[in-house]
Image (cartoon, grey):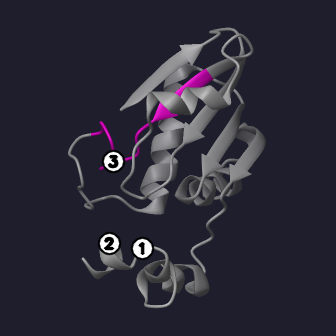
Amino acid sequence: YWEESGNPDGVPVIFLHGGPGAGASPECRGFFNPDVFRIVIIDQRGCGRSRPYACAEDNTTWDLVADIEKVREMLGIGKWLVFGGSWGSTLSLAYAQTHPERVKGLVLRGIFLCRPSETAWLNEAGGVSRIYPEQWQK
């Protein structure tokens, strides 16, 4: 799934949501002035409004990078800003490393680099489990 909004002649920017597994919401447009930016929002494979939902088959980081590039090509965008949060920041960095000539700039927030300490904080006792113990037990 992908959508466009904002100024068709504006500075192109792609929004990459967190997750994996989450999706983009209409509120994501709020990061950008629609008079200035041509806003592209995608739901990554298996996420949000993309189909099939929650499918992990052929859903690697590099598959997602290729999807982003296909969207850029389809829309006829030369270079764009890449904006990502959480997992989207990781994906933004992977895209920028793979296609540096297509990236006008990066905006990264809530950076998640998939380091062992970060994944342990999410998946093991003593990290996120201290903040939401009931949900973590489920």
Residue 43 painted magenta: yes
Using a 10 Å C-alpha cutoff, classify the residue at mark 2 as few (fewer than 14 neighbours), some (14 to 19) or many (20 or more): few
Q: Residue at x 23, y 41 (%)?
A: 51
| Residue contact between numbered discs 1 and 2, judged by CB atoms under 8 Å | yes
Horizontal and vertical percent position of residue 13: 66, 30
Quarter of image, res 55: bottom left
The residues bearing labels 1 and 2 have C-alpha atoms spaced at a distance of 6 Å
Residue 25 versus residue 115: which sits nearer the camera? 25
Q: What residue does disc 1 label? A: 132
Q: Is residue 100 placed above or below 133 in the rendered structure?
A: above
Using a 10 Å C-alpha cutoff, classify the residue at mark 1 as few (fewer than 14 neighbours), some (14 to 19) or many (20 or more): few
The residues bearing labels 3 and 1 have C-alpha atoms spaced at a distance of 23 Å
Using a 10 Å C-alpha cutoff, classify the residue at mark 3 as few (fewer than 14 neighbours), some (14 to 19) or many (20 or more): many
| Residue contact between numbered discs 2 and 3, judged by CB atoms under 8 Å | no
Quarter of image, res 32: top right
Q: Residue at x 54, y 33 (%)?
A: 28
Tag 2: amino acid: Gln
Q: Residue at x 22, y 47 (%)?
A: 53
Residue span colored magenta? 39-50
Query: Visible in this render: residue 83?
Result: yes
Quarter of image, res 90: bottom right
Q: What residue does disc 3 label? A: 47
Q: Residue at x 42, y 29 (%)?
A: 2
